[in-house]
Image (tube, rainbow, N blue to C red):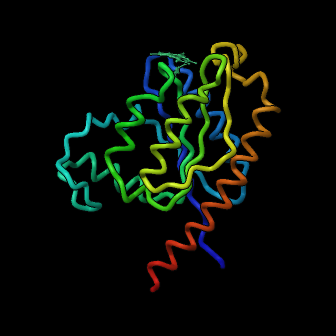
Amino acid sequence: MQTSALKIQIIIGSTREGRAGEKVGQWVKKLAETRRDFTSEYIDLKDWALPFLTDPMPPSMGKYASEFTRRWSKKISGADGYIFVTPEYNHGYSAVLKNALDHVYQEWNNKPAAFVSYGGGAGGARAVEQLRQVAVELQMAPIREQVAIPIIWEAFDEGGMLKDAAGHKKKAENMFNQLVWWARALKAARENDRNV
Ligand SMILES: Cc1cc2nc3c(=O)[nH]c(=O)nc-3n(C[C@H](O)[C@H](O)[C@H](O)COP(=O)(O)O)c2cc1C
């Protein structure tokens, strides 16, 4: 079934002064821009500055109490899939990312989620394991292929280039391929739902 162009959002899950997240996010963005099978949008949670969740339940799409949630809802609902770029903080993912996830619900539903993580020896893998559980509750389809960059403080050279670019690029391409497969399938299914 033919579907319209896929839109993938790359969501940067760290906001700390001097963060590595921006370098990793920019690397993902540049690779994503070489793809012809989707368009990408870079979303830096630092630019969003969502407050901790204050909205009353139930969070119903289009009926949010606060202006920032309405803006966030509009932004997130425009995508067909997501790539979460996450640090690992104390064996979990960042609080700012959890807060951003919790602000809306239906907007994430029936869309695929991919993960790029970084950290110490485990490359942020423990953070992604937690994110996968949360993604399922948000009715996303977490895909298998992921990128994990270990020892992040040594991963980029002085010019800001990823040292093991070839190895990580191969992983990223595999991740993009799976993400596109799921994004296409789920977009067709969502469009089919609207037509019945
Ligand atoms: C609060 C905090 C907790 C951390 N805990 C872990 C951890 O559990 N595992 C790990 O591999 N790295 C950990 N690190 C190191 C981070 O992986 C590293 O600092 C990374 O650059 C954080 O991402 P960011 O720079 O985008 O904030 C921690 C860093 C911070 C700031």
Left-right relation of 124 to 45:
right
The outermost residue toward the bottom is: 196
Percent of width and height locating residue 43: 48, 42
Asked whether 106 or 132 is in front, the reply is: 132
**What residue lies at 42% left-to-right and 35% top-to-bottom?**
97
Left-right relation of 75 to 35:
left
**What residue lies at 34% left-to-right and 49% top-to-bottom?**
72
Asked whether 95 or 68 is in front, the reply is: 95
Percent of width and height locating residue 51: 26, 34
Percent of width and height locating residue 48: 36, 38
Total of numbered circles in the picture? 0
Q: Where does the N terminus fall, quadrant-wise?
A: bottom right
Left-right relation of 46 to 34:
left
**What residue lies at 61% left-to-right and 30% top-to-bottom?**
125
Asked whether 175 or 161 is in front, the reply is: 175
Q: Where does the C terminus fall, quadrant-wise?
A: bottom left
In the picture shown, does residue 150 fall above or below 179? above
The outermost residue toward the right is: 166
Percent of width and height locating residue 41: 54, 48
The part of the image, by quadrant, that contains residue 31 is top right
